Image (cartoon, rainbow, N blue to C red):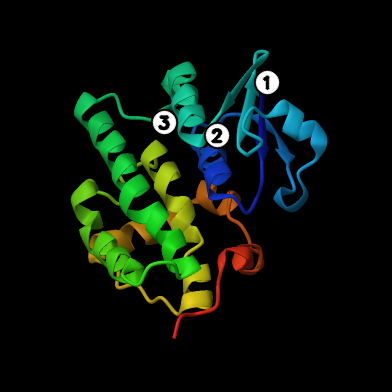
Amino acid sequence: MLKLYTAQVCPFAHRCRLALSFGHLESERVEIDLAEIPDWYRRLSPNEKVPLLEHDGHRIWESAIINEYLSDVYSDRGLLPDDPLLRVKFRLAVDWAGNAVIPTFYQVLRNEQADAAERLHKAIADMPQWMSLEGPFWLGDQPSLADAAIYPWFERWNVLEHYRAFQAEWPARVQAWLDAMRQHELVIQEAGDPQRYVKAYARYTTPAKV
């Protein structure tokens, strides 16, 4: 049995919940309170963070590593395409998001760097070149680990709107992807409460610079 230690507000844990759902993999979910991480979990988790996966007596941590492990162990579940070039596209897209989207998301939220909002707008404008032209999902007509790796921050986009009045202009291809994800049954199943995100992400904010 797969056992995932997760937290509803955490986008990295959200990656793994989506992967499990996309693969139709049964799992036990254990919710961890990140505001007050219990001592037993600190002892269990090597990095004292979520997500953490237990499987066959082994512990695996770090969301990207967990998801690739799931893809390797359950290779028949379609978490990644068989085409080697599409797998390369997946890895390049995740690397791009890890450099251009995810850190910039938090820089805008924290109001840390004056050009962060401009860089995030540029990242959004550049998104289509990292995506399959056919769509509607990142790599084609079915959701995959690419979608699982990147979408969690877009589900939390409302915190940028709430705290920083950040308004994105989505390219048509990106809007089609967002619509497909938001309407997909398995994505809805793993979705969080937008107001809970706003409350949880308050700790990342700082007073706006004047």
Residue designated by label 3: 79
Between the C-alphas of marks 1 and 2, the distance is 12 Å
Residue designated by label 2: 20
Secondary element under disc 1, as helix, strand or loop, is: loop
Residue 49: name its quadrant: top right
Q: Examine the rendered structure and indicate whether residue 10 appears above or below residue 61.
A: below
Binning the other alpha carbons within 10 Å of mark 2 as few (below 14), some (14 to 19) or many (20 upward) gives many
180 relative to 4 in the view: left or right: left
Q: Position of residue 179 (x, y in %)?
A: 39, 61
Q: Quadrant of the N terminus?
A: top right
Residue designated by label 1: 1
Check disc 1 and give the amino acid type: Met
Between the C-alphas of marks 1 and 3, the distance is 18 Å
59 relative to 92 in the view: left or right: right
Check disc 3 and give the amino acid type: Leu
47 relative to 30 in the view: left or right: left
Seen as rendered, the residue at the extreme top is 56
Check disc 2 and give the amino acid type: Leu
Residue at 38%, 76% (x, y): give it. 167
Secondary element under disc 3, as helix, strand or loop, is: loop
Between the C-alphas of marks 2 and 3, the distance is 9 Å
Q: Position of residue 62 (x, y in %)?
A: 52, 33
Residue at 62%, 54% (x, y): give it. 9
Label 1 or label 2, whichever comes before in sequence order: 1
Label 2 or label 3, whichever comes before in sequence order: 2
